[in-house]
């Protein structure tokens, strides 16, 4: 399930424990860079990192393609941010649901010693994915 927040988007796992928030989008230099905060929560896990993208690094089109593929696809599809501090993996179960696994790294994602955290949430392949894709387009503006 996803919902719109005043300052972003929240996705909640079916059990209500795992949560992903994409928040506080801003253009720090009044150009094509869009920064936002990614927060992950689960039982015993609280992690957050700032993510820098160039116009969303293709995230809006990637989520739109997932939403348009509501009947399913084989394997895993993925998206990665400019500085490799955020990744999203998507799998379709063939029965109308998409599992999104959000992975964040910090404080310097390219450093081998960087920490990594991940949370998975499920969305309905149809309406939920379409709504999520629309919210991502708003976030990346």
Image: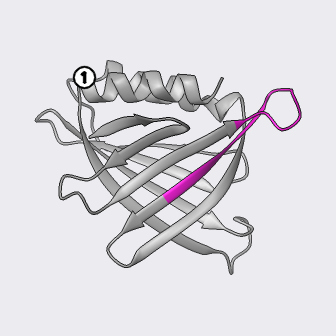
- Badge count: 1
Q: Which residue is mark 1?
A: 127
Left/right placement of residue 8 relative to residue 129 reads right
Left/right placement of residue 89 relative to residue 85 reads left
Q: Position of residue 103 (x, y in %)?
A: 49, 59
Q: Which residues are magenta?
A: 26-39
Q: Position of residue 37 (x, y in %)?
A: 62, 50
Q: Quadrant of the N terminus?
A: top left
Q: Position of residue 27 (x, y in %)?
A: 78, 33
Residue that appears at 35% across and 24% down: 131
The image shows residue 69, relative to residue 119, as above or below, that is above
| The image quarter in which residue 141 lies | top right
Tell me the crowding category of disc 1: few under 14, some 14 to 19, or many 20 or more residues within 10 angstroms, Cα based: few
Residue that appears at 53% across and 68% down: 47
Left/right placement of residue 27 relative to residue 67 reads right
Which residue occupies the extreme front position in the image? 6
The image shows residue 59, relative to residue 65, as above or below, that is below
Residue that appears at 42% across and 52% down: 20
Left/right placement of residue 50 relative to residue 68 reads right
| The image quarter in which residue 93 lies | top left
């Amino acid at each position: 399930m996803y919902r719109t927040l005043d300052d972003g988007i929240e996705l909640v796992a079916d059990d209500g424990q795992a949560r992903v928030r994409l928040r506080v989008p801003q253009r720090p230099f009044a150009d094509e860079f869009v920064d936002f905060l990614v927060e992950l929560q689960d039982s015993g896990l609280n992690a957050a990192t700032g993510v820098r993208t160039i116009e969303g690094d293709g995230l809006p089109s990637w989520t739109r393609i997932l939403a348009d593929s509501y009947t399913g696809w084989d394997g895993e599809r993925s998206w990665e941010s400019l500085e490799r501090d955020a990744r999203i993996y998507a799998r379709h179960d063939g029965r109308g649901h998409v599992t999104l696994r959000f992975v964040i790294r910090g404080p310097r994602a390219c450093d081998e010693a960087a920490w990594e955290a991940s949370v998975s949430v499920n969305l309905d392949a149809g309406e939920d994915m379409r709504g999520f894709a629309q919210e991502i387009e708003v976030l990346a503006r």
